[in-house]
Image: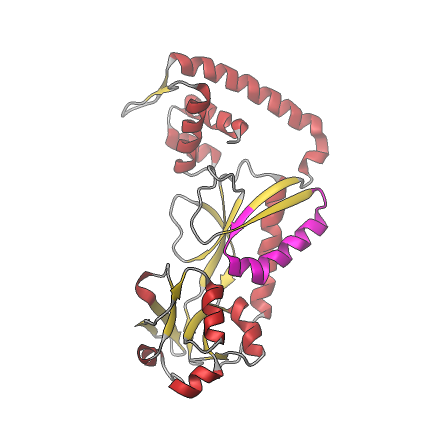
């Protein structure tokens, strides 16, 4: 737990008399404010607030803790002033989590450029497809490719992720090439475990929306497993363009359904607070915004 941030959260709650007002003032999600308050009460070893339907009020322990938190924040603010201009230079450790496919295709190279640009920083990169608790797992930045962000998350859209339907030449020679999305019902489609009901969605060249339920004998929670299976001729996969494009260019996979565009997804950076963002995190977000923008302009395939 970052005790300085927890202290700021508690002081803000006490001064405003509301966790919702504190969340708005600190530009945090309400869930994060609740977690920080719980951590502060655990740290203090006592209940700090009386909770009522109208307004929050401090317990006796809360009064004592509030005074101590204010003194602690005064010291912390004095240290920030003493640091001078150097405090704005990106430094320190960033803990980042994202999927293995995104890390392998793009993020590893982006992190390498970041570390060269800011030599006083370091990065701990964690591979995971699940939605992590940033506070509990001490994660500074989570990257997610999705179109369904939870409404209470603080996030910045960094770019877009285009997808492509593809299969190996050997599979198409044996099973034939689908000409329209509806043809996928007769094929072995390799599906992503977390996508609800394996519904693949497209936009036709004429603007019409097409949704097709698909199924197959292999599903996985990691894109790279499905990509490898498609490369070996196991079936048809819907893949991020950043992962599939090199294999398509090499002739190992064939891009399908040229008249239909799979739904575009957003690439988001998720973090705990805009107001208390470190210079290193701010610099990383700025770099990734440029990085994913360049990738979107450079990556393309010619469907067969």
Q: How many marks?
A: 0
In the shown orientation, is residue 121 left or right of residue 178?
Answer: right
Q: Nearer the viewer, residue 133 or 203?
A: 133
| Colouring | secondary structure
The picture places residue 135, in percent across and down from the top left corner, at 47, 37
Q: Main secondary structure of the magenta part?
A: helix
Q: Is residue 279 above or below residue 36?
A: below
Q: Which residues are magenta?
A: 96-120
In the shown orientation, is residue 183 left or right of residue 110?
Answer: left
Q: Say if residue 177 shows up in the picture.
A: yes
Is residue 115 a member of the stretch shown in magenta?
Answer: yes
Q: As drawn, which residue projects farthest toward the left? A: 53
| Residue at position x 42%, y 80% in the image | 257
The picture places residue 269, in percent across and down from the top left corner, at 51, 50
Q: Say if residue 176 shows up in the picture.
A: no
Is residue 65 a member of the stretch shown in magenta?
Answer: no
Q: Is residue 206 above or below residue 50?
A: below
The picture places residue 294, in percent across and down from the top left corner, at 61, 63
Based on the displayed image, in which of its 4 quarters is residue 46 positioned? Answer: top left
């Amino acid at each position: 737990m970052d005790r300085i941030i927890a202290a700021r959260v508690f002081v803000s709650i006490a001064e405003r008399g509301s966790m919702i007002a504190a969340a708005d003032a600190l530009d945090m999600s309400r869930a994060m404010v609740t977690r920080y308050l719980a951590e502060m009460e655990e740290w203090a070893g006592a209940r700090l607030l009386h909770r009522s339907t109208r307004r929050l009020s401090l317990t006796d322990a809360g009064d004592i803790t509030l005074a101590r938190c204010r003194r602690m924040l005064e010291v912390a603010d004095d240290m920030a002033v003493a640091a001078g201009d150097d405090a704005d230079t990106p430094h320190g450790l960033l803990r980042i989590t994202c999927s293995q496919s995104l890390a392998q295709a793009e993020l590893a190279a982006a992190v390498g450029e970041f570390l060269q640009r800011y030599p006083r920083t370091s990065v701990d990169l964690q591979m995971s497809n699940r939605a992590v608790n940033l506070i509990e797992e001490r994660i500074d930045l989570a990257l997610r490719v999705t179109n369904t962000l939870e409404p209470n998350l603080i996030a910045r859209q960094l770019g877009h992720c285009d997808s492509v339907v593809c299969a190996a030449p050997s599979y198409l020679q044996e099973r034939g090439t689908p000409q329209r999305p509806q043809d996928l019902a007769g094929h072995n489609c390799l599906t992503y475990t977390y996508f609800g009901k394996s519904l693949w969605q497209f936009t036709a060249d004429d603007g019409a929306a097409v949704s097709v339920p698909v199924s197959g004998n292999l599903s996985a929670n990691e894109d790279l497993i499905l990509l490898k299976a498609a490369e070996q001729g196991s079936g048809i996969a819907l893949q991020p363009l950043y992962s599939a494009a090199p294999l398509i260019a090499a002739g190992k996979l064939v891009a399908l359904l040229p008249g239909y565009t799979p739904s575009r997804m957003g690439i988001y950076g998720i973090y705990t607070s805009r107001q208390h963002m470190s210079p290193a995190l701010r610099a990383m977000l700025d770099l990734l915004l440029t990085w994913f923008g360049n990738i979107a302009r450079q990556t393309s395939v010619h469907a067969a």
